[in-house]
Image (spheres, coloured by chain):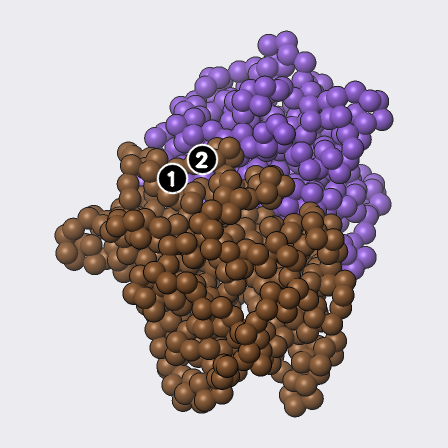
Chain colours: A purple, B brown
Amino acid sequence: MTDTQFLLPESSIPDHWYNVVADLPRPPEPPRAPDGSALTPQALEALFPPALIAQEMSTQRWVPIPDAVRDIYRLWRPAPLYRAHRLERALDTPARLYYKYEGVSPAGSHKPNTAVPQAWYNAQAGVRRLTTETGAGQWGSSLAMAGQMLGVDVRVYMVRVSYDQKPHRRSMMQTWGAEVIASPSPHTAAGRAVLESQPESPGALGIAISEAVEEAAARADTNYALGSVLNHVMLHQTVIGLEAREQMALAGDYPDVVIAPCGGGSNFAGLAFPFVADKAAGRAVRLLAVEPASCPTLTRGAYAHDYGDTAGLTPIMRMYTLGHDFVPPGIHAGGLRYHGSAPLVAQLVHEGIVEARAVPQLATFEAGVLFARSEGIIPAPESNHAVRAAIDEALEARHSGQPRVILFNLSGHGHFDMASYDRYFAGELRDYDYPEAAIADALQRLPTVR
Amino acid sequence: MTDTQFLLPESSIPDHWYNVVADLPRPPEPPRAPDGSALTPQALEALFPPALIAQEMSTQRWVPIPDAVRDIYRLWRPAPLYRAHRLERALDTPARLYYKYEGVSPAGSHKPNTAVPQAWYNAQAGVRRLTTETGAGQWGSSLAMAGQMLGVDVRVYMVRVSYDQKPHRRSMMQTWGAEVIASPSPHTAAGRAVLESQPESPGALGIAISEAVEEAAARADTNYALGSVLNHVMLHQTVIGLEAREQMALAGDYPDVVIAPCGGGSNFAGLAFPFVADKAAGRAVRLLAVEPASCPTLTRGAYAHDYGDTAGLTPIMRMYTLGHDFVPPGIHAGGLRYHGSAPLVAQLVHEGIVEARAVPQLATFEAGVLFARSEGIIPAPESNHAVRAAIDEALEARHSGQPRVILFNLSGHGHFDMASYDRYFAGELRDYDYPEAAIADALQRLPTVR
């Protein structure tokens, strides 16, 4: 029996983040102001501390991780990498399957990797209060924990439908001392506007972002934190892939394909970006971003300029988008229900460096259950997208009779998503038709840039 | 900064369990049949496979762990041991606090440590079906996972109130392929008897045990598995303490006091029993079992012969007991709501080798929140009992100005217990008066032995 676990000591927590911008074939397009004009760093200062703005604009390949951040990373990092021997046997495949497990963080996902530095840089800049949004609650709970540890108060605008249906993620945020508000809320103009036209609105991630941004922009004592999409968020998440590269070396293996779920992009960027560096250096490795078929940003969206939020309060970025007011169908992978994508992930897809694939909901749950029954861990619905694609790659290896080394990001556990599994077993989950008309309609309203 | 993590490689998973019977000052009293007569090994064969009966009776110090069991342990073991630097700073204590974290198992607690070998020994004996009971669901989910991995069908009788209020633990069992039945149920005579007198009965662990035992005794194709109390369960859990002893050595430290929650006893035995060996060899170490003040088996119970279940279907054991039909108040640490204790833990308390302490509910949640806010992990309510006692020991060290090395068992996470934290924050949890009259009453009905 070969090894199952590939563990690194805490001394191997990376001391630098990897900035993929340094290895892009051409520089990323700078973001634009919401009115389409050129965006100045000053415009971002209402929302972010200088250090994060500098990271957002940085072209340096390596960015040092502050000791205080590494000190908190020690509570769960380096995250383990496992060889999925039991899943391999269940699939009867010659493929070698490896997964990086980010569910070991106290919040249960990869999100604290960026929540901690974001809270820390804000605290260093004297900011004592942050707003943010959350969908299913993985990001909100992560920022709540980080804020609590670093002396920063956190207010979370939580999408109403999750606020009502996922009370336990809300409880988690409160246990870590955060204030949680159902969005749309009467606290902001953006929220009031929605409530006026639709008092029973279930909310959406784009609306919650509008509320959090509006409040942070209006209050001098308050900054804003985003859990995905932005360059500095991708940067922070690269600890995942940096560790995984070392762990694959411990295993004496190197992936033929690196797979991660992709919503806003931080999950994918975290594992895959360090392998972009290898690819840029000539190494053969496929990088595969997996998204929901019902929210197919990378596979069916336009590569265009668009807002990050619904109300058009955020900067405009060049990305793959389904239109900023497109509302995705109610799939259970809440973390992947986002109209856009990280500009860096979008550019890599556009340049042909990263592949994208869309998978339907039922197939992802089928994969998650097979994973749970062989490896034990019950994955988050978002993570099931990577599990599905990894299984499909392993089955292809079986059909072709060729070994293949597959590495995927098991980005979180499903302990707060058991109701979704219930519905899956009860036959109440379904696949959705590709929402072609709604997307075509939303794409009519892309902003213009000057 | 000294280290935070003390990790062992998978090659350090123990290859033997430690049997504390070898280090007891006198041999344990054998169990009796339900009618009070001497119990023959044959009488146990309706419920357990021969290998587990042999372990139940064994006096050998070391019992080998089968390779197939260690192979599944590899999915999460060795479990990490952490130094709680941040909690120490929050308490401003000269104490050094260490915790062994068993929440890394896929089921989220220490329970799979015995679920896996129990399922395996049954499978080896050709048994393809197991019944068991579960309260809050930690044990039921662990046996569901183990059964799924080893090809054994599992039926879980789940205490009705948990079945209704903790649907997510139930979903977890179903994801791992188990059948879950609310108890009391119409499937058994024991269940029907309760339902007749009390159709709306919320159930109790003792009743669910009666149901699971009754079914297993009646069906030739079915055995029974218990998650605590019995000697072989204590034995299997010693992997916790065996690893922790090695990890403390890595830390260059040795505990002055070893602390774990105590309900049925497997949580406590798992961490503490290997230190009993040290104590027997003359080493100075305190061993502290922490129980709920409202279910104070070790601190206020009688050291007497009693049944393990409510209906009197199980063997009679000498233990600390509050009376087999005592129903503990509805505290949220469901895993500690048990009238009895493991005979081995009871004997160690009776002999003065182990100390016991009872703590009230609100103080345990206060401790759990402080832990979550400093170390990140949100503990299970059961684990909060150990956290409380560990904090109290650390505060004593502060008051006395003397360092103290404290090791405790963080036996599980609280992801399925967030409703309890909600109620704590809402001021809806309370402490209970010591249920003196109910206990005195229940102790009138202890069985007599011949």
Give the percent coordinates (x, y) of residue A171: 50, 60
Q: Is residue B279 left or right of residue A26?
A: left
Number of residues whose C-alpha sits closer than 10 Å to that of mark 2, classed few (under 14), some (14–19) or many (20 or more): many
**First in residue order: circle 1 vs circle 2:** 2
Give the percent coordinates (x, y) of residue B178: 71, 58
Q: CA distance from mark 1 to mark 2?
A: 7 Å
Q: Quadrant of residue B166?
A: bottom right
Q: Which residue is mark 1?
A: B247
Q: Residue at x 61, y 50 (%)?
A: B116
In the picture shown, does residue A415 fall above or below B296?
Answer: above
Q: Is residue A442 left or right of residue A241?
A: right
Q: Is residue A43 visible?
A: no
Does the residue at mark 1 contact the one at mark 2 (Cβ under 8 Å)? Answer: yes
Q: Is residue A224 left or right of residue B158?
A: left
- Give the amino acid type for the residue marked by disc 1 in the picture: Gln
Q: Which residue is mark 2?
A: B8
